[in-house]
Image: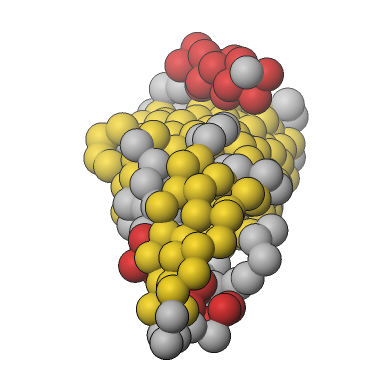
């Protein structure tokens, strides 16, 4: 409940942020041992915030992702394939940005924390059963599980390069590395074996969804502030 309240506060901060610049961008997430995930346009607003001074800024935002598949950790076994998904995930970052502004380009180094929450979670039983077969040394396995879905959080760092082709239009390329997790305790059982079948109980209270991977973004920025060298340039808004 506490994490959900934090996500709510971050989302309200995102909605309240003011920005005069806007743009179009596409972000993609490549999770560790997961499937390539895509954004749900136009439900993405990133880069909202304010300048502390010429070199420092605070940014936030929110994005809705279509997660094709994420992995889990803190299980008795490991899997190279995702164990949950697909689902929709709301992602809210808050970051400190170090800005280097030139006449026609801007390079930003950024880092901070983020919250996320997966909606409509489901277990990928095909991959889960394969992981159980490998772990137990069985030929067949069939799982029957329940879970408790929770919001999660993590930290991230990355960089963004924006090149202005005119005084008001720029092209941005951004990459971030994300490390996060959310509690996802599992209960139930699985049945399997080789020549005979047996059933084993599942009680993994420390299981977590692994939200680790690379996020890439590319977009067009439409600036009303006259490029990166203009005074008091407001932070941009991306959809």
In depth, the one of 83 and 190 nearer the eye is: 190
Residue found 63% across the figure and 49% down from its top? 203
Residue found 60% across the figure and 72% down from its top? 78
In depth, the one of 160 and 64 nearer the eye is: 64
The reply to whether residue 227 is in sight is no
Residue found 49% across the figure and 69% down from its top? 198
Q: Position of residue 38 (x, y in %)?
A: 32, 54
Residue found 53% across the figure and 35% down from its top? 148
Is 137 left or right of 139, judged from the image as shown? right
In depth, the one of 171 and 103 nearer the eye is: 171
- On-image quarter of the C terminus: top left
Q: Position of residue 117 (x, y in %)?
A: 49, 34
Which scheme is used to colour this image of the protein?
secondary structure
Q: Position of residue 108 (x, y in %)?
A: 63, 51
- Against 43, residue 144 (above or below) is below
Q: Farthest residue to the left: give it.
A: 41
- On-image quarter of the N terminus: top right
- Against 133, residue 173 (above or below) is above
In depth, the one of 162 and 1 nearer the eye is: 1
Q: Position of residue 26 (x, y in %)?
A: 33, 51
Q: How many marks?
A: 0
Is 161 left or right of 28, judged from the image as shown? right
The reply to whether residue 137 is in sight is yes
Q: Farthest residue to the front: give it.
A: 196
């Amino acid at each position: 409940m506490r994490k959900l309240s934090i996500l709510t506060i971050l989302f309200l901060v995102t909605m309240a942020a003011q920005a005069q610049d806007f743009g179009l961008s596409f972000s993609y997430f490549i999770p560790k041992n997961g499937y390539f995930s895509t954004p749900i346009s136009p439900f993405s607003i990133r880069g909202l915030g304010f300048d502390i001074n010429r070199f420092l800024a605070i940014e936030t935002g929110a994005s809705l992702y279509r997660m094709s598949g994420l992995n889990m950790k803190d299980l008795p076994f490991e899997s190279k394939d995702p164990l949950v998904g697909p689902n929709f995930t709301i992602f809210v970052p808050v970051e400190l940005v170090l800005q280097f502004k030139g006449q026609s380009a801007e390079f930003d180094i950024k880092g901070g924390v983020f919250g996320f929450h997966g909606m409509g979670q489901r277990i990928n039983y095909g991959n889960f059963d394969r992981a159980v077969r490998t772990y137990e040394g069985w030929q067949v396995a069939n799982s029957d599980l329940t879970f408790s879905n929770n919001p999660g959080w993590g930290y991230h760092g990355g960089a963004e390069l924006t090149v202005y082709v005119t005084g008001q239009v720029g092209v941005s390329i951004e990459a971030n590395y994300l490390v996060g997790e959310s509690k996802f305790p599992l209960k139930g059982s699985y049945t399997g074996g080789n020549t005979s079948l047996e059933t084993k109980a599942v009680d993994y209270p420390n299981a977590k969804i692994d939200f680790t991977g690379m996020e890439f973004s590319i977009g067009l920025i439409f600036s009303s502030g006259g490029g990166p060298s203009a005074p008091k340039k407001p932070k941009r808004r991306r959809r």
